Amino acid sequence: MERFVDLKSYNTFGLPVVASYFSLISDTSDMEALIADNVFQESRKLILGGGSNLLFLDDFFDGLVIQPQNKGWEVVDEKGNLVFIKVQAGTDWAAFVDEMVDAGYHGLENLALIPGKVGAAPMQNIGAYGVEIKDCFYELEAFDFQTGKIKKFDKDSCDFGYRSSIFKHNARGRYLINTVTFALKKQANLNTSYGNLEDYFTKKGIKNPDIKELSEAVKDIRRAKLPDPTFIGNAGSFFKNPVIHQLLFDDLLKEFPQIPAFPAGTNTYKIPAAWLIDHAGWKGYRKGDAGVHDKQALVLVNYGNASGREIFALAMKIQLDVKKKYGIHLDPEVNII
Ligand code: EPU
C-alpha cells in the first residue's frame, strides 16, 4: 500500500488530488490481505477504474483508493451462436472492444473508444450509439467487502437502468467488481439506427457496414465530438439526458418548437441535455480553466488548472439556468467525490 499518492493521472479531469492511501489489487489474495489491514477497516474507500467518470471536489482524498489491476479475457463457453467472454476488471475497455471486433464477436462494437476500465462499465451501464452493456451482459463476479467472499450477479440482480445499476445505488461501495462476463454473438444484425451513424454511412456511401466499419464509424464520430482526456480534461457527459412528462413537453414545444425528443415510455420523453445546455447559450463557455466543450455541450472540460470545485460550480450554474429556462432538472451523470 502506498501513502500520499497524487491521483492526477488517475482521473480524466486531470485534477491533482492526493489520496492518503492507494492500493493496487491483482487477485483475490491481494484483496484478502487488504481486508485484513487496519487501514482498510478504518478508511473511507474509493474503488477506481479508469477514473473517467468522477469529479473530485477537494484536492485531498482522506481515504483508501483501491484500483484493480487484473487484466485479460478468455472464452469461457460457447452455445450455438453465443460466445461467453469473461474479462478481468482492470482491462482497458476500449482495447477490449477492439479485440472483440477483431475476433468478430458482436455486441460491443457501438461502445468503441469509451475511456475507462471493464470493472467500471457495469456500474453505470455504459452506453453509446443505441447500445448499453446490459444488452449483452451475462454475469459478473464481485468481491463483497462485508462478507469477504466473491458473489455472482446475473443481469437481473444488477438492476440496470439508464446510466445506472445496483452498484451506483443500493449496493454503492460494498463490492469490488472483479470480472465481467458478456454473451456476444458470432453472427448478428448490427445496430446502426442511432441518428449520427445513419448520416455517417450515407455520407461515406457505405450500404451494409460490417462490424469493423461500424466500430470505426463510432470512433470517428466520437473523435470529432468528444475531447480526448489525454489533451483536455473531461469525464464525458456530465449530466444524464432528462426524461420529462408529456405535459411539460407539450408546453416546451410551444416556446421551443425545435426541441429534440425521443419517446421513453408512456407519456414520457427523453430530451438531449446537450441541446438544453447548448440552446441556453453555454456551449464553448469558459471561466478560468473550467469550461463547456465547444463541440458537445454536455461535456464539461478542464483546460488545465481548474479545480474540482470550479468545475462543480460551473455545473451547478448550468443546472440552475436550465431549470429556470426550461423547468427541467439535470441530474449529474458523473460521480461527485
Ligand atoms: N446536441 C446539441 N448540442 C450539442 C450536442 C448535441 O444540441 O452540443 C443535441 C443534438 O440534437 C443531438 C442530441 O443533442 O442530436 C444528442 O447528442 P449526441 O448524439 O451527441 O448524444 P448525447 O445524448 O449528448 C449520449 C451519451 C453519450 C454517448 C452519446 C452517443 C448520455 C448522458 N450521454 O450523449 O455518452 O456517447 O449519447 O450515444 O446519455 C457519456 O456517458 O459519458 C457519453 C459520452
Image (spheres, rainbow, N blue to C red):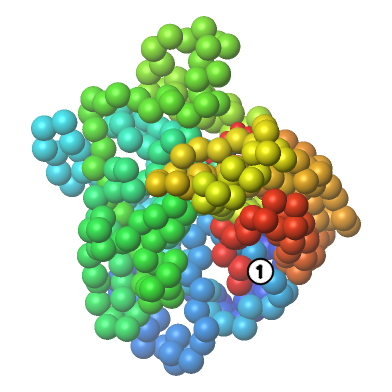
Question: From the Cβ of disc 1, is ligand 1 less than 8 Å away?
Answer: no
**Rendering coords of residue 38 (x, y %):** 44, 92
**Rendering coords of residue 286 (x, y %):** 85, 50
Q: Which residue is at the front of the view, 324 or 33?
A: 324
In the picture provided, is 251 more to the left or to the right than 44? right
**Rendering coords of residue 317 (x, y %):** 78, 61
Q: Which residue is at the front of the view, 226 or 23?
A: 226
Vertical placement of 196 versus 47: above or below?
A: above
Q: Disc 1 designates what residue?
A: 56
**Circle 1 residues within 10 Å: few <14, some 14–19, many ≥20:** many
Vertical placement of 253 versus 60: above or below?
A: above
Task: Quarter of the image for the C terminus: give it.
Answer: bottom right
- Residue reaching furthest left? 80
Amino acid type, mark 1: Phe
As helix, strand or loop, the secondary structure at mark 1 comes to: loop
Residue located at (54% from left, 30% from top): 219
The quadrant holding residue 78 is top left
Vertical placement of 251 versus 311: above or below?
A: above
In the picture provided, is 315 more to the left or to the right than 68? right
Q: Which residue is at the front of the view, 21 or 249?
A: 249
Vertical placement of 127 versus 222: above or below?
A: below
The quadrant holding residue 176 is bottom left
For the question of whether residue 282 can be seen, the reply is: yes
Residue located at (88% from left, 57% from top): 288
Residue located at (57% from left, 64% from top): 335
Picture quadrant of ligand 1: top right
Residue located at (11% from left, 37% from top): 79
The quadrant holding residue 77 is top left
In the picture provided, is 160 more to the left or to the right than 197? left
